[in-house]
């Protein structure tokens, strides 16, 4: 009889290989209001995952063994007797903490999204593309013609952000760290400037070319990148924090001795803001429809990292690959 292979957190550790175990369980039974989905592709969120297996996500209680992973796309294998709007064989997207890193999942019908096909591209749009759309709309409040600077611009989130910003007629400055990422950003044909931070000092470049001109800084790196963006915000500029990669990589927040942040922003009327996707859940349907339409019509390129990762066992390797800064586009594992 087929089994359900899962990657679970079995103990807390700083190392994913020490923290996790591959285990096999029975394929889950569904109740009258649930759907059984066979996951086809899962998305890797290595930084969030690492905080989970370190036991440092304050709103998640991890009990061992804990299935983790957030987003997947797959095929409906069975439906509960109360389900009316979904059929066996439909392609669906699921986004729920503690569900993705397994071959089969039982999930409430209200938590699935029907999609045209279960592909890595639709996996990237929901939820990563949704995050880009909602962060620009609600937190950045990006306006036509503004200057936006984006760190980690060739990542799963960043490469959507730069395209959506260009669609609004903005001047887009994209920051990345490898020649392969430069090539990806060039292929999008939407960036006015591409900065490889391993070749060019970001602080010096922005302080020379964009001093007091950054309307929106979109940062998921932190530390030196945050400081360079903050320093060069325009009057009424907005610095959007969408991640803390450097702090999380180090495992501890850097202790800073110096003037408080408002010393940099008060006289400009500027602001520092943070984005969390789940706080805008009521807007997810609208964002998905816009992005699905843009993708179908060819107005949005969705880039998936070309490195192949296959099977539940490959999730740890894919996570290490992403944490090493090697990714170009969204990192996806095929199940």
Image: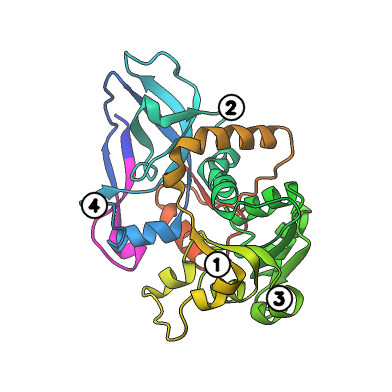
- Mark found first going from the N terminus, 3 or 4: 4
Which of discs 3 and 4 lies nearer the camera? The answer is: 3
Disc sitting over residue 61 in the figure: 4
Q: Residue at x 40, y 52 (%)?
A: 313
Dot 2, crowdedness within 10 Å: few (<14), some or many (≥20)? Answer: few
- Whether the magenta-drawn stretch holds residue 9 is answered as yes
Q: Is residue 305 above or below residue 335?
A: below
Query: Which element carries disc 3, helix, strand or loop?
Result: loop
Q: By what rule are the colours in the image chosen?
A: rainbow
Position in image of residue 294 (x %, y %):
69, 36
Q: Are marks 1 and 2 in contact (CB under 8 Å)?
A: no
Q: Which residue is mark 1?
A: 325
- Mark found first going from the N terminus, 4 or 2: 4
- Give the magenta part as a residue range: 5-22
Which of discs 1 and 4 lies nearer the camera? The answer is: 4
Question: What whole-number distance in Å separates the C-alpha atoms at marks 1 and 3?
Answer: 28 Å
Question: What whole-number distance in Å separates the C-alpha atoms at marks 3 and 4?
Answer: 44 Å
- Mark found first going from the N terminus, 1 or 4: 4
Q: Which residue is mark 2?
A: 116
Disc sitting over residue 211 in the figure: 3
- Mark found first going from the N terminus, 1 or 2: 2
């Amino acid at each position: 009889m087929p089994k359900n292979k899962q990657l679970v957190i079995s103990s807390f550790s700083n190392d994913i290989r020490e923290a996790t175990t591959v285990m096999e369980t029975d394929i889950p039974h569904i109740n009258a209001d649930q759907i059984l989905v066979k996951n086809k592709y899962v998305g890797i969120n290595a930084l969030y995952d690492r905080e989970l297996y370190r036991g440092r996500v304050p709103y998640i209680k991890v009990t061992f063994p804990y299935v983790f992973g957030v987003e997947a796309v797959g095929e409906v294998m069975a439906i509960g007797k109360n389900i009316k709007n979904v059929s066996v064989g439909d392609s669906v997207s699921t986004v729920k903490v503690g569900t993705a890193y397994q071959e089969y999942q039982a999930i409430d019908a209200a938590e699935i999204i029907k999609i045209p096909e279960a592909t890595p591209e639709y996996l990237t749009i929901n939820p990563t593309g949704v995050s880009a759309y909602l962060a620009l709309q609600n937190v950045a409040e990006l306006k036509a013609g503004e200057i936006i600077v984006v760190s980690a611009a060739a990542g799963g989130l960043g490469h959507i952000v730069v395209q959506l910003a260009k669609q609004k007629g903005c001047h887009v400055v994209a920051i990345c760290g490898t020649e392969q990422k430069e090539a990806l950003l060039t292929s999008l044909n939407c960036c006015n400037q591409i900065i490889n931070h391993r070749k060019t000092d970001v602080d010096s470049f922005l302080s020379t070319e964009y001093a007091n001109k950054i309307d929106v800084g979109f940062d998921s790196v932190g530390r030196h990148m945050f400081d360079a963006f903050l320093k060069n915000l325009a009057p009424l500029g907005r610095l959007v924090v969408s991640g803390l990669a450097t702090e999380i990589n180090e495992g501890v927040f850097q202790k800073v001795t110096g003037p408080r942040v408002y010393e940099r922003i008060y006289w400009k009327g500027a602001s520092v803001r943070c984005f969390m996707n789940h706080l805008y859940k009521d807007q997810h349907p609208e964002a998905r429809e816009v992005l699905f339409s843009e993708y179908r019509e060819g107005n949005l390129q969705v880039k998936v990292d070309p490195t192949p990762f296959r099977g539940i066992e490959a999730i740890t390797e894919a996570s290490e690959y992403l944490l090493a800064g090697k990714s170009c586009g969204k990192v996806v594992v095929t199940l």
